[in-house]
Amino acid sequence: MAVQSIGYDLLIVVEAKQQESLEEINTERFKKFKNKTLWAVILSIIVVTIGMFFMDTIKVATETMWNFDDAGSDLEEIQIRRLNRYMIWYWIYARIESDGNSKDNIISIFEEKPVIELNRLKTKEENNRFFFQLEKRKDQPLKLAIFHKNHLIRNGCASNMLLEGLVNGIKEVKGKQILNIMRSFFSR
């Protein structure tokens, strides 16, 4: 008796109109779901395309800049400001590659300029411009520091293979090699 009083023995008769109404509701829900899914796919393609556009643009820009430095033989020196620009562009490329999953993320990547410093190469000054001498080292191992989002990422170990690869990439004008090293710092 107590179960009947709360309605569990209730028998509901579904009329034909009610059944049609349920089918219409389900059909409308499915159409909305398809529409949302289609727009999600379209927007994802747009975001990926935007990321690829910026990555391609950075690649073309850095390759163009390297053409001004490439004299057909290994570089012996490079202006420090110029090298810092290269490393910043490669850092941005690596970040877009990793975190460029939305338009807002891509914009914020461009807004957040890191400070990147390579240390322990000998320097020289010429006409108020400062250069790294790529063949000459100070007595201590090379160090690279990247300050980004209030975090300091450093490398300066005894073997220094990573940073020697960076210097060799600079000397040989190999942007891909420099990009790979910046990727390794970003993934830390």
Image (cartoon, rainbow, N blue to C red):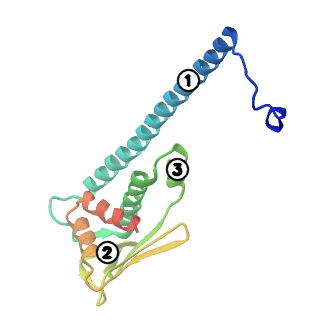
Mark 3 = which residue? 105
In this rendering, the answer to whether 70 lies above or below 5 is below
Quadrant the C terminus occupies: bottom left
Mark 1 = which residue? 30
Quadrant the N terminus occupies: top right
To which quarter of the image does residue 141 belong? bottom left
In this rendering, the answer to whether 3 lies above or below 84 is above
Which residue is at the far top?
16
Residue 42: image x %, image y %?
Answer: 47, 30
Taking 53 as reference, is 73 left or right? left
Question: Which is more foreground, mark 2 or mark 3?
Answer: 3
Q: Which residue is rendered at x = 19% and y = 64% of the image? A: 172
- Considering depth in this image, is 98 or 27 the residue closer to the camera? 27
In whole angstroms, how far apart are the C-alphas of marks 2 and 3? Answer: 34 Å
Q: Which residue is rendered at x = 38% and y = 68% of the image? A: 185
Q: Amino acid at mark 1?
A: Phe
In this rendering, the answer to whether 127 lies above or below 54 is below
Question: Which is more foreground, mark 1 or mark 3?
Answer: 1
Mark 2 = which residue? 132
Residue 10: image x %, image y %?
Answer: 76, 26
In whole angstroms, how far apart are the C-alphas of marks 1 and 3? Answer: 31 Å
Residue 101: image x %, image y %?
Answer: 47, 47
Q: Earlier in the sequence, mark 2 or mark 3?
A: 3
Identify the secondary structure beneath mark 2: strand
How crowded pointer 1 is (Cα within 10 Å; few <14, some 14-19, many 20+) is rated as: few
Identify the secondary structure beneath mark 1: helix
In whole angstroms, how far apart are the C-alphas of marks 1 and 2? Answer: 63 Å
